[in-house]
Amino acid sequence: MDKLYKGLKPSRRNFLRGAAATGVAAFGGAQAARAQGAPDPAITEIKPWMQYLGDGVDARPYGMPSPYEAHVRRQNVEWLTADPVSSVNFTPLHELDGIITPNGLCFERHHAGIAEVDPAEHRLMINGLVDRPLVFTMEDLMRFPRENHVYFLECAANTGMEWAGAQLNGCQFTHGMIHNVMYTGVPLRLVLEEAGVRTNAAWILPEGADASGMTRSIPMEKALDDCLVAFKMNGEALRPEQGYPVRLVVPGWEGNMWVKWLRRIEVGDQPWHHREETSKYTDLLADGQARRFTWEMDAKSVITNPSPQAPITHGPGPMTLTGVAWSGRGTIPRVDVTLDGGANWHQARMSGPSLMKSMHRFYYDFEWDGRPMLLQSRAHDSTGYVQPTKDQLRQVRGENSIYHNNGIQTWAVNENGEAENVEIS
Ligand code: MTE
Ligand code: CO
């Protein structure tokens, strides 16, 4: 034992406690202290799994999480939509750490359910204002030079329920219409260049192969900039839920434009208002005017732990708070955290890769005095933009819209460590 832990540095926890910072005590904190009193059955008892041979290497050809992690799952809110086929479920942000969303936990948003596409029967067609209309098989697509990029996808309706006030009790439901994945794909620019985009071409209209045949107008400038025709997520084939075998990746822009089961891209000289979703994705202002073309996702953050689904269970003392932040315009160099509803702000500790248009992970390590807290986080992005309060947003945009709510989220934590979704002004 001693030998195993010899290399460990004294932890901050023990340092704060003034305890002798050696061996197991340094590693286990409060747990180790308890073990010194009464014998801990978790140590003294012989457990069942120590007494039988486990599954061999042939038993689990595609690995699944431990059965003890069964609560870590996507969830929908039944009353939110009329039918699960045209609906949404939510990423369990409070169960995750780091910046990558595991494939099986990426939220889903479908307009006509999951299309089960046979890749051998799937084609991607490029037509419209091009010199050579083309049809690609999946094999053709994979012969282009491909790239890897980590990007977040956030639905424009994420946090939409919270415009009018605190509604849903859990960051999974208030902020879970987002995932962050490494994509492997071909720059859309290369595919368009192959077809030869005409000089008067200014827009593209990607179309999905699902029963909704979803389409969105995207300006050519963005199409030629950083969009990807992606076929892998986190190293493996896209999941059917995420558009297998191929989806459009539109970094930093609202999720609706990331057409899944991508089967056609029409090139044109103006947006296709009559045919597509763009008309629906506007933000109605108080004076009756609507904001249009609000594609970029503004900087946003949320504390994932503690939160309503993830209360503090260990009582007062040293603890680490964590959350995620992202911006459709760049990176997140800084996140501030407050424990007292904005009276005092502290700079959070960023940890993990800081990538363009990707989720960032932040932590704040502090000593909880056991008193109630009002937790908030505030993201700063690399353009200098600072995440606004919900009231600041409402002053500018009124209360009609449900899209693009990137306001600061508040969790009220009581003395038992339980957290609740509240709004303070
Ligand atoms: N693409 C197709 N073909 N059909 C759809 O229903 N939904 C869109 C977009 N692309 C959709 C689609 C919406 S509104 C969002 S937010 C994202 O896909 C969700 O992507 P996800 O299911 O991978 O989370
Ligand atoms: Co959406």
Image (cartoon, grey):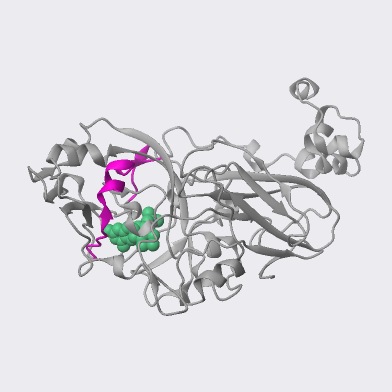
Residue 219 inside the magenta-drawn segment = yes
Depth check, front residue: 341 or 181: 341
Examine the image and state in which quarter residue 83 appears.
Answer: bottom left
Report x, y in % for residue 389: 62, 63
Q: Residue at x 14, y 48 (%)?
A: 126
Report x, y in % for residue 221: 28, 47
From the viewer's perspective, tell me whether residue 104 is left or right of residue 306. Answer: left
* Total tally of numbered discs in the picture: 0
Depth check, front residue: 289 or 141: 289
287 up-or-down from 396: above or below: below
If the picture is divided into quarters, which one holds ligand 2? bottom left
Report x, y in % for residue 141: 20, 38
Q: Residue at x 35, y 59 (%)?
A: 256
Q: Is residue 359 in sight in this rendering?
A: yes
Depth check, front residue: 48 or 314: 314
Depth check, front residue: 249 or 48: 249
Examine the image and state in which quarter residue 33 appears.
Answer: top right
**Quadrant of the rendering where the N terminus is positioned:** top right
192 up-or-down from 109: above or below: above
Q: Is residue 114 in sight in this rendering?
A: no
Q: Which residues are magenta?
A: 212-239
Residue 178 inside the magenta-drawn segment = no
Q: Residue at x 32, y 56 (%)?
A: 257
Q: Residue at x 33, y 53 (%)?
A: 258
**Quadrant of the rendering where the C terminus is positioned:** bottom right
Examine the image and state in which quarter residue 143 appears.
Answer: top left
Report x, y in % for residue 60: 43, 39
